[in-house]
C-alpha cells in the first residue's frame, strides 16, 4: 500500500497476520443498540466462516465487532485484530476484554511501544485497518466520522466497501447513507457480504438457529431476524398483543432465545449466549 509503515509492533497471536481473509468492521463510538447488535452479529458469523475481523478497539461498534469475532472464532487460530493509534504496550481505550483478545487475536500498531494516543494518529491507524483487509464494512457512522476515513482509504486502496443501511431519521445513519450515495454496497447479512465478495458461505458457517415453539414466539422470532426491536415495534409488526407479547418475551429470555439489549431493544441470542442458558 502507498505510505506503508516502516515497521509494525504486534502483541498477542502472531498468526493474526498470517495469510487469511480479513474484513474490517468499523463504526460509531456512540452506536445505537441496533448498531451494536449488528456489529456483534457480523463479527460472530464472519469469524465462524473463517475470517479475521479487523477493527480499532474503540468503544461502540469496534469493540462489539471484536466481541462477536471472539465468540465466533475457532480456538486454534486468531479471530480478530485490533489496530491501535498508540503503542501496543499501552492499549487505549481500556477494555475489560483485552486479555481475551490477546489470547485469541492481537493488537497491532505502527507506533512504537510507549507512544501515547494522539489525535493525528487515528487517520493513519484507519488507513492501516483498510490496507490489511479485503473489504471494509461500516455499521453506523455520523456524517463526519473516522469510520468514513477508513472507508475512503478502502476505496483508494481498491478494497470493497460495504455499508449497513440504517434509519434515515437517525444521526448515526447519516454516514452510511453518505457512503451508499457515493457507491458503497448496501449489505443486510454476512452471507450476502460474502456472496458479493465471491466467497463461498461454506461448512464453517453457522447453521440456522433452532426456532422457538408457539405461535406468538414464532412471530417474535421472525420479526427479530437481523433486527433489534422494541416492544412497541414488535406489537406494530403483528407479533402479538401487548400482554401476550410481554409474557412470551420473558419466557424467550429465560429459554435463551432472546436477549434484551441497550434501550430496551430485543434481539435474537447468539449461539454462545444460548449455550450459556442450556
Image: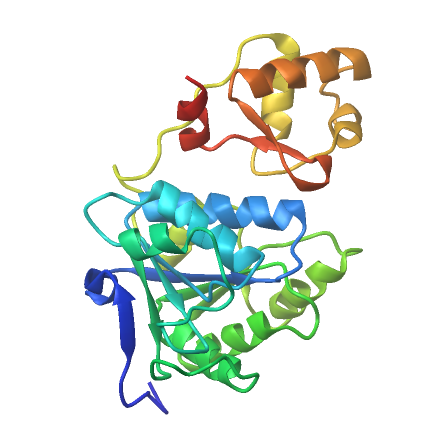
Q: Position of residue 256 (x, y in %)?
A: 51, 21
From where the camera sits, is residue 167 visible? yes
Q: Nearer the viewer, residue 214 or 60?
A: 60
Relative vertical location of residue 166 with respect to residue 133 in this rendering, above or below: above
Task: Count every numbered label the image shows and give the total.
Answer: 0
Q: Nearer the viewer, residue 100 or 43?
A: 100
Whether residue 132 is visible here, answered yes or no, is: no
Is the N terminus in the top left, top right, bottom left or bottom right quadrant?
A: bottom left
Q: Residue at coordinates 65% horizontally, 55% vertically from top-left? A: 31
Q: Toward which corner of the image does residue 196 lie, by quadrant?
A: bottom left
Tell me the quarter of the image containing the C terminus: top left
Q: How is the image coloured?
A: rainbow
Q: Is residue 160 left or right of residue 22?
A: right
Figure check: 67 above or below 225: below
Residue at the spot 28% in from the left edge and 90% down from the top edge: 6
| Position of residue 79 measured from the top left corner of the image (x, y, whole percent) | 31, 52
- Judged left or right of residue 202, residue 101 is right
Residue at x 61%, y 50% (from the top left corner) = 35
Q: Is residue 201 left or right of residue 210?
A: left
Indicate left or right for 109 with 235 as reference: left
At which x and y percent is residue 130?
Answer: 42, 73
Residue 43 position within the rendered picture, expressed as x and y whole percent measured from the top left: 43, 49
Q: Residue furthest top?
A: 214
Amino acid at each position: 500500500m502507498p505510505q506503508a509503515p516502516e515497521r509494525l509492533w504486534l502483541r498477542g497471536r502472531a498468526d493474526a497476520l498470517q495469510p487469511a481473509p480479513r474484513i474490517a468492521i468499523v463504526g460509531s463510538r456512540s452506536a445505537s443498540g441496533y448498531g451494536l447488535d449488528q456489529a456483534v452479529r457480523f463479527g460472530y458469523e464472519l469469524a465462524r466462516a473463517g475470517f479475521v475481523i479487523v477493527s480499532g478497539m474503540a468503544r461502540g461498534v469496534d469493540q462489539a465487532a471484536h466481541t462477536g469475532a471472539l465468540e465466533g472464532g475457532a480456538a486454534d487460530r486468531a479471530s480478530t485484530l485490533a489496530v491501535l493509534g498508540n503503542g501496543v504496550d499501552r492499549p487505549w481505550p481500556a477494555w475489560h476484554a483485552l486479555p481475551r483478545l490477546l489470547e485469541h487475536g492481537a493488537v497491532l500498531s505502527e507506533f512504537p511501544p510507549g507512544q501515547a494516543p494522539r489525535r493525528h494518529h487515528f487517520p493513519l491507524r484507519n488507513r492501516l485497518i483498510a490496507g490489511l483487509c479485503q473489504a471494509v464494512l461500516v455499521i453506523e457512522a455520523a456524517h463526519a466520522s473516522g469510520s468514513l476515513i477508513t472507508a475512503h482509504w478502502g476505496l483508494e486502496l481498491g478494497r470493497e466497501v460495504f455499508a449497513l443501511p440504517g434509519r434515515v431519521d437517525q444521526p448515526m445513519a447519516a454516514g452510511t447513507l453518505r457512503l451508499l450515495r457515493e457507491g458503497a454496497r448496501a449489505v443486510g447479512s454476512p452471507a450476502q457480504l460474502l456472496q458479493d465478495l465471491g466467497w463461498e458461505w461454506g461448512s464453517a458457517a453457522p447453521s440456522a438457529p433452532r426456532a422457538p415453539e408457539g405461535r406468538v414466539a414464532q412471530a417474535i422470532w421472525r420479526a427479530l431476524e437481523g433486527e433489534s426491536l422494541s416492544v412497541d415495534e414488535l406489537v406494530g409488526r403483528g407479533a402479538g398483543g401487548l400482554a401476550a407479547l410481554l409474557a412470551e418475551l420473558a419466557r424467550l429470555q429465560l429459554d435463551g432465545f432472546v436477549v434484551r439489549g441497550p434501550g430496551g431493544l430485543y434481539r435474537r441470542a447468539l449461539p454462545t449466549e444460548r449455550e450459556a442458558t442450556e
